[in-house]
Amino acid sequence: MPALNDVLAALDALWPPERAEQWDAVGTVCGDPDAEVTRVLFAVDPVQEVADEAVGLGADLLITHHPLYLRGTTTVAASTFKGRVVHTLIRRDIALHVAHTNADTADPGVSDALAGALDLRIVGPLVPDATDPEGRRGLGRICELDHPETLREFAERAAARLPATAQGIRAAGDPDHTVRRVAVSGGSGDSLFDAVRAAGVDAFLTADLRHHPSSEAREHSDLALLDAAHWATEWPWTEQAAAQLDAISDRHGWGLRTHVSRIVTDPWTAHAAAPAAPRSTP
C-alpha cells in the first residue's frame, strides 16, 4: 500500500497547488507523510459529520473541496467546531487534504463534473487559463445541449440530475426562453457575468447568485439564470475525483479503496414556496 506522501504527490499532479488562487488555502491540513493509505473518502465539506463518516469507514485520508481553515487560525482547540474536526481526524490517524480553486480550474475540474452531471457537451472554458497552451483549463465551462430546451425544461433537467437540496433550482427569465448554449460554473459564480455575456450563451447555471449582480445581468440582456445550491454544483466533482484517483491506484497497483460521501452538507434544510410566484411587483 502507498504512503500518504505517494498519494499526495499524485493529488498534486491532478490539482497543482500553485494553480490555486492566492487567497486560497489548499493542500494537506493534517497527516503523517509516512503513514500507509488504504481507504480514501471524498467530500465537499470538512465538517464534523463527514469526519465521523471517515472514522466509521476506517479511512486513512479525507479529501475535501472546501478548506477547513480558509482564513487562518490561532487555535485548533476541540472547543471550536473546526478544532474538533482536527482532533477527530488526528486521533484516528486520518489525513485531511484540500483541493479547492486548483480543482476548479483543472482539466478536468469542478465545472467539467457539473457539465457531465447535466449531460452537456463541453465546448471550452468560460475563463481560460492563460498559462494553458492547450486552452482546456480555466474557470467555468461553455457547453451546448444536444437539442434545444426551454428554460423551464432545462431547470427541470438540473433539478433532476443534481443532488437534491432544500433550495432546488431557481430560474430567472422567460420560462419559454430557448436554451441551446449554456455556461456553467460550480460554486459561487456571479463574479463571472462579464465572461458569461461575452460568451454569448443563452443561460448561466451556477450557485450563490446575489440580487444586485443578477438584476444587472438580466437588465443587460435576456440571459437566463439558474441558481442551484453551492454544495449541489460541486458535489459531482467528488465522484469525478474519486474516479481519477482510482485510475492512478490501478496504474500503480496500490489497491486503494475510494468512497464518496453522500451526506448532504448544504446548510439549508427547508424551503417554503409562495403559493404563486408574482410576475411583477409594484
Image: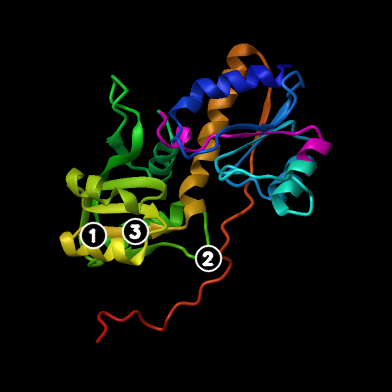
Relative to 37, say whether 89 is above or below: below
On the image, the x and y values in percent for residue 115 come to: 38, 42
| Measured Cα–Cα span from mark 2 to mark 1 | 25 Å
Q: Amino acid at mark 1?
A: Ala
Name the mark on residue 166: 2
Q: Label 2 is placed on what type of residue?
A: Ala
The disc at residue 226 is: 3
Question: Residue at coordinates 23% horizontally, 59% vertically from top-left?
Answer: 217
Which residue ends up furthest to the bottom in the rendered image?
282
Label drawn at residue 217: 1
In the rendering, at what x and y percent does residue 236 appear?
A: 50, 43
Question: What quarter of the picture does the C terminus occupy?
Answer: bottom left
* Residue contact between numbered discs 3 and 2, judged by CB atoms under 8 Å: no
| Residue at 21% across, 48% down | 201
Of callouts 2 and 1, the N-terminal one: 2
Of the numbered discs 3 and 2, the one sitting upstream in the chain is 2
Q: Looking at this view, is 96 or 234 the one in front?
A: 96
- How far apart are the alpha carbons under marks 3 and 2? 15 Å
Horizontal and vertical percent for residue 224? 25, 59
Mark number, residue 163: none
